[in-house]
Amino acid sequence: MASPEPSAVGAGAGGESGSQAAAVEPIRMPTVEEIKGQDIWNNCAVRSVVSGVMGGGLGVLMGLFFGALENPIMAEEMTARQQIVYTAKQMGSRSISNAKTFAVMGLIFSAAECVIEKARAKHDTTNTAVAGCVTGGALAVKGGPKATCVGCAGFAAFSVAIEKFFDRHT
């Protein structure tokens, strides 16, 4: 809210000053470029691919970090050069593995959430829970039906907890 200027105060109760700022901002209509950008981002395929790429990038960074923390078993018998080579190989293999996992996780979760949101025409925590269940179940499907159910429940609970923590749906 803008405070009245001294000239507006002196004008009296009925007088408005032309230099006083408007109390209500006018609504700004989105430009054509903004509308096109929103249309592109609302496409589930685009969202899923972007989430997969970002998940892969996160996986690479986590793989580099956790691969560097891994110590060789025979560290006292290895030279410094051997330890560096071993650590670099561990970082590389861990990065590739984590990148694949996080890329698939991001792609599945984003695709599931987007499709569910469009089908239900609602943006709420239920979408997150169902997408988490689909993602957890899909990642654990190789372990059998019990692992799939545990993965579904665990990832759904984790997704809802993160959703509540960030409080996106108020």
Image: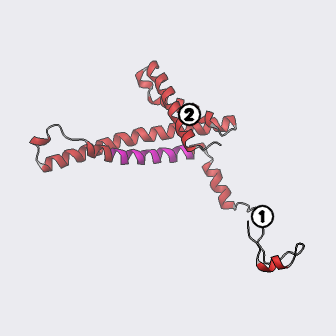
Tell me if 164 is positioned left or right of 98 in this view. Answer: right
When asked about the image quadrant of residue 167, the answer is top right
The residue under label 2 is which amino acid type? Answer: Ala
Residue 93 appears anywhere in the view: yes
Does 125 appear above or below 80?
Answer: above
Residue, disc 1: 24
What is the quadrant of residue 93 in the picture? Answer: top left
26 up-or-down from 78: above or below: below
Residue 48 x %, y %? 54, 43
Q: Which residues are magenta?
A: 46-63
Q: Amino acid at mark 1?
A: Val
- Return the residue at label 2: 131
Point out the frontmost of discs 1 and 2. Answer: 1
Q: Of label 1 and label 2, which has the lower sequence position?
A: 1
Taking the magenta stretch, the answer to whether it contains residue 52 is: yes
Label 1, label 2: how many angstroms apart (C-alpha)? 40 Å
Q: Position of residue 70 (x, y in %)?
A: 25, 41
Circle 2 Cα neighbour tier, 10 Å, few/some/many (<14 / 14–19 / ≥20): many
